[in-house]
Image: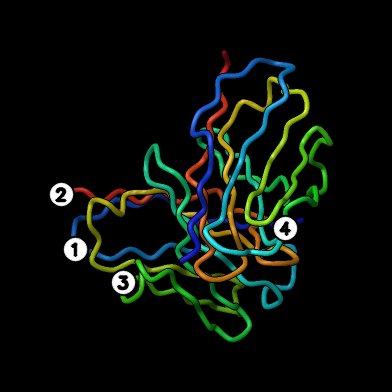
Amino acid sequence: DIQMTQSPSTLSTSVGDRVTITCRASQSISSWLAWYQQKPGKAPKVLIYKASTLEGGVPSRFSGSASGTEFTLTISSLQPDDFATYYCQQYAEYPYTFGQGTKLEIK
Amino acid sequence: QVQLVQSGAEVKKPGASVKVSCKASGYTFTNYYMHWVRQAPGQGLEWMGIINPSDGSTNYAQKFQGRVTMTRDTSTSTVYMEVNSLRSEDTAVYYCARRGTSGYCIYWGQGTLVTVSS
């Protein structure tokens, strides 16, 4: 199975901060990576797919990039609604594995 | 609009089985694979497997092979996920999620809490 190592697990941040979350795949997954946002008690919501394509309706402050097997989710200026948990997922091959998650907390 | 509506919460005893349903609407049911993902309390997301509603073919994560069965009913646009031999570690919220243009999960059900307790 492809392992997805996500970091950090928790990030204390403030409104207006630039935030970067990293996900590293244990082998090549090309660009078959998605990022999700999950709020407590809710289903996840896709933000980005194919490593850098913004899902419709997602604010442009969210962006994704890739370099080899390392993937990054960037929030350019954190908004109050962005405090949530974020997950990466590879969908290059079965099983489609998730990262462990990154929780954004208010500093 | 695409909607995935899941069945209600369940409480089961260890060793029992549970079958969760996911009724799809707003798109052509047989055109898109459906994922199942679970989340134990306070934990991360875990991909369980996927079903092709067109022909019923499935792919399960190794961890769930032999204990999980995914099926579909095209007449009602519903997919099902059954877990056998439940144990306390299976206590989780189970989600169905429709595949996007490629393999990611674009639309999600509301989740079904399955509690396994004696």
Residue under label 2: B118
- Please state which amino acid type lies under the numbered disc 3: Arg
- Please state which amino acid type lies under the numbered disc 2: Ser
Between the C-alphas of marks 1 and 3, the distance is 11 Å
Mark carried by residue B2: 4
Question: Could you tell whether A83 is left or right of A40 in the image?
Answer: right
Between the C-alphas of marks 2 and 4, the distance is 37 Å
Instruction: Using the rendered image of the protein, determine whether residue B7 is visible from the camera's viewpoint.
Output: no
Mark carried by residue B67: 3
Residue A104, position as x, y percentages in the image: 57, 27
Instruction: Using the rendered image of the protein, determine whether residue B117 is visible from the camera's viewpoint.
Output: yes
Label 4's element? loop
Q: Are marks 3 and 4 on the same chain?
A: yes
Q: Are marks 2 and 4 on the same chain?
A: yes
Closer mark to the observer between disc 1 and disc 3 = 3
Vertical position of residue A27 compared to residue A61: above or below = below
- Please state which amino acid type lies under the numbered disc 4: Val
Asked which colour scheme the image uses, the reply is rainbow
Label 2's element? loop
Q: Are marks 2 and 4 in contact (CB under 8 Å)?
A: no
Mark carried by residue A68: none
Q: Sequence-wise, which precedes: disc 1 or disc 2?
A: 1
Q: Are marks 3 and 4 in contact (CB under 8 Å)?
A: no
Q: Are marks 1 and 2 on the same chain?
A: yes
Mark carried by residue B15: 1
Residue B74, position as x, y percentages in the image: 60, 79
Q: Residue at x 46, y 66 (%)?
A: A1
- Please state which amino acid type lies under the numbered disc 1: Gly
Q: Are marks 3 and 2 in contact (CB under 8 Å)?
A: no
Q: Give me the chain letter of mark 4.
A: B
